[in-house]
């Protein structure tokens, strides 16, 4: 669970939703040259894709000595507390926004993961059974091309493959072009299209729609008193990742939420040991702990980077209000909260907005959301949350 990750707007741009950008290439924080899909042309149908500049926060939070500290940690039998180095220390004012984790949805996070363990025995078995095999590059390219055609986005989004992401995928803007980078290790047969629904069908298309609206600029949002796009943005994207799966478990969002919560009171090694209840594979556990502890130099201290809790937070808020949200309008309005839909409806431009293919039948879409609630055994839990 941004994604990946895993967003567009006009200038002056707000921070993009999404997940961690690719790792360093020749120098820290720089991106490797993009490899685009075949036949990707610049510009489409006379409409210019939005082109924000991604803030550097998440690039800066990728430790420079990541591999060295991982090796030391593994050689210590997982007892060493990594000491991370960064390009430049982020000011406290920047990190403060994500310093406090929440336990509000901890019960739901644990419940979701316990559902998976009861059915599959382990996360690793769940991944193998429901995710399918990791696809070779040629099949990834073919699947991406097919999806872009479904959404009418051929020529608008540059796509490249990487083995250096902390997340499954990320949408950024490079050289004024929306660019989707996909983590090859996470490109599984039955999960790849869900990632494309997350990044392109949700983040990208909502960004395109946002660019048409009176609130496309930061000043416009401020004048209208809009709520932040998150947690709605990432909640929708995360739901769309699993929307059409036969077994749409919300495992990733749940484990990210759980890990961040406990990082707030544990050291890196304590956290690594603690989440073994849910993940056996040491490499996977390392990735989750790294995400929860990023930004810290001395990981022997309690502390978290809470951004990853937004996925489950958004998911649960949307699911509990799913029968009253007008999802087509929500998507047409762009980067807005579901709570702002009704008051913005009269101000919106609808003439050139785009709805992803999987949202065009509202009745069927709601059936998929109901299925997600049932599979994750959230019915009673969501009822208790209604008063919060």
Image (spheres, rainbow, N blue to C red):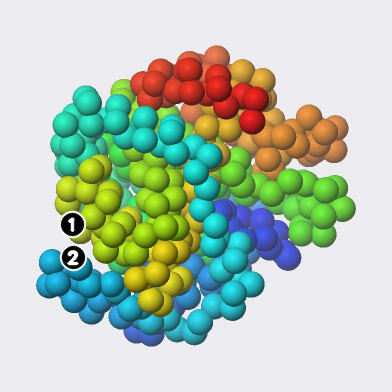
Q: Position of residue 127 (x, y in %)?
A: 22, 39
Q: Secondary structure at mark 1?
A: helix
Indicate which disc residue 311 carries: none
- The residue drawn where x is 28% and y is 72% is 81
Circles 2 and 1: CB atoms closer than 8 Å:
yes
Q: Position of residue 324 (x, y in %)?
A: 66, 20
Indicate which disc residue 282 carries: 1
For the residue pair 318 and 54, the one nearer the viewer reads as 318
Q: Secondary structure at mark 2?
A: loop
Q: Position of residue 385 (x, y in %)?
A: 57, 27
- The residue drawn where x is 39% and y is 21% is 377
Q: Position of residue 240 (x, y in %)?
A: 46, 35
**Is residue 201 placed above or below 299 in the rendered structure?**
above
For the residue pair 176 and 78, the one nearer the viewer reads as 78
Q: Which residue is mark 2?
A: 78
Instruction: Quote the CA–CA distance across marks 2 and 1.
Output: 9 Å
Task: State which quarter of the image contains the C terminus.
Answer: top right
**Is residue 165 placed above or below 235 in the rendered structure?**
below
Q: Earlier in the sequence, mark 2 or mark 1?
A: 2
- Is residue 17 among what the camera can see? yes
**Is residue 271 placed above or below 323 in the rendered structure?**
below
For the residue pair 198 and 59, the one nearer the viewer reads as 59
On the rendered structure, is 54 left or right of 137?
A: right
On the rendered structure, is 334 left or right of 156?
A: right
- Is residue 45 among what the camera can see? no
Quadrant of the image occupied by residue 125: top left
- The residue drawn where x is 54% and y is 78% is 90
């Amino acid at each position: 669970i941004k994604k990946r990750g895993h967003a567009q707007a006009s200038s002056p741009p707000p921070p993009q939703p999404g997940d961690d950008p690719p790792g360093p290439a020749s120098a820290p924080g720089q991106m490797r040259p993009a490899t685009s899909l075949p036949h990707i042309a610049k510009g489409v149908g006379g409409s210019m894709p939005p082109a924000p500049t991604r803030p550097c926060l998440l690039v800066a939070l990728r430790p420079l000595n990541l591999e060295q500290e991982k090796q030391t940690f593994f050689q210590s039998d997982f007892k060493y507390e990594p000491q991370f180095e960064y390009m430049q220390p982020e000011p406290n004012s920047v990190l403060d926004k994500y310093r406090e984790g929440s336990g509000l949805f901890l019960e739901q996070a644990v419940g979701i993961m316990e559902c998976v363990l009861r059915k599959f025995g382990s996360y690793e078995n769940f991944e193998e059974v429901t995710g399918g095999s990791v696809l070779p590059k040629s099949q990834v390219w073919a699947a991406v091309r097919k999806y872009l055609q479904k959404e009418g986005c051929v020529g608008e989004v540059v796509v490249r493959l990487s083995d250096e992401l902390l997340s499954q995928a990320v949408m950024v803007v490079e050289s004024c072009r929306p660019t989707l980078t996909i983590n090859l290790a996470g490109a599984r047969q039955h999960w790849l299209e869900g990632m494309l629904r997350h990044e392109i069908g949700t983040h990208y298309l909502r960004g395109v729609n946002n660019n048409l609206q009176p609130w496309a600029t930061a000043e416009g949002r401020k004048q209208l008193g809009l709520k932040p796009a998150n947690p709605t943005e990432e909640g929708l994207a995360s739901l769309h990742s699993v929307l059409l799966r036969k077994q749409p478990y919300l495992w990733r969002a749940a484990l990210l939420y759980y890990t961040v919560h406990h990082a707030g009171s544990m050291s890196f090694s304590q956290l690594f040991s603690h989440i073994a209840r849910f993940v056996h594979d040491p490499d996977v556990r390392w990735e989750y702990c790294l995400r929860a502890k990023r930004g810290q130099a001395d990981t022997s201290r309690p502390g978290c980077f809470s951004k990853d809790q937004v996925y489950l937070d958004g998911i649960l808020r949307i699911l509990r209000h799913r029968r009253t949200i007008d999802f087509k309008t929500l998507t047409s309005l762009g980067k807005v909260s579901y709570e702002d839909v009704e008051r913005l409806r009269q101000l919106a431009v609808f003439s050139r907005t785009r709805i992803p293919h999987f949202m065009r039948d509202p009745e069927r879409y709601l059936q998929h959301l109901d299925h997600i609630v049932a599979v994750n055994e959230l019915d009673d839990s969501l009822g208790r949350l209604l008063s919060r």
